[in-house]
Amino acid sequence: MAEGSACWQELKSTLCRLSRGEQEEAQDTASGRTCRAPVPRPPEPLNEPMVYLSAEQAAVIAAYPGLSHIRLPAWVPHALVADQLGHGCEAIRRAVDFLGGKPYLWATEFENVHSLWRYSEPRITVAGETYANSEDYYHSRKPTVKCRSAFDEKWEPIRYGVMKEAVRAKLQAAPDELRELLDATDTHMLLSIKCDEVWGFHPEKGGENLLAKVWMDIREERRASPL
């Protein structure tokens, strides 16, 4: 678009009426470039559990009237998302109790496997070996023993460390948005409600919430050594 053209003048007039973020988006559109919006920070103070929905989730929330109006990316009350998905809020109340009354944050980007929500897991490299994704690496490290008790004896002491290696490699391989998202969670608690009593918080049985703890550990590593 030529600077002296009528279209350019119209764009300049429009930019004067827009916020800075909207200006950048309009300029990128005019120049043919595409860019993503930065990851917003969750509201402060954080008064309730919230989940992050990236722009990729637009096609998903379009099917839910109570969510379809939300402009993404955004942090959305978990209770609203759970209600729209038909899950109710009892598990959220239990999760907050589990955390000593503290609200939490979560995002599908922090999961290793995705069903409803959209996220493309990156290929990762650990110790010079490449894996399809973090979940692939995690399972590749499991002991090859048939006896359950022998398996547990070998696996349980190391599984947290293996997952931490997997998530650390994922964070390194993923686009900048994932690092921005983790940094945006600041010092807030992270928690994943899912039917997994080890890596998540089971909606009925509770759980150890270990995957969220891995992410919080890595977040602290980044705060101690940002580079």
Image: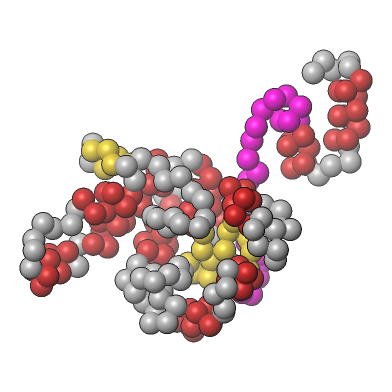
**Quarter containing the C terminus:** top left
The quarter of the picture where residue 45 lies is bottom right
Q: Which x, y percent locates residue 194?
A: 43, 70
Q: In this view, does 68 lie to the left or right of 157?
A: right
Number of numbered markers: 0
Q: Which x, y percent locates residue 104?
A: 53, 70
| Residue 30 within the magenta-colored segment of the rendering | yes
Q: Main secondary structure of the magenta part?
A: loop
Q: Is residue 48 left or right of residue 198?
A: right
- At a point 36% along the width and 52% down the height, the residue shown is 167
Q: In this view, does 196 lie to the left or right of 176?
A: left
- At a point 53% along the width and 45% down the height, the residue shown is 177
- Front-most of 204 and 95? 204
| Residue 63 within the magenta-colored segment of the rendering | no
- Front-most of 71 and 129? 71
- At a point 77% along the width and 34% down the height, the residue shown is 26
**Quarter containing the N terminus:** top right
Q: Which x, y percent locates residue 52?
A: 58, 59
* Whether residue 31 can be seen here: yes
Q: Which x, y percent locates residue 90?
A: 53, 83
User: Where is 137 relative to 196, above or below?
Assistant: above
Q: Which residue lies furthest to the front in this view?
A: 63
* Whether residue 96 can be seen here: no
Residue segment shown in magenta: 27-48
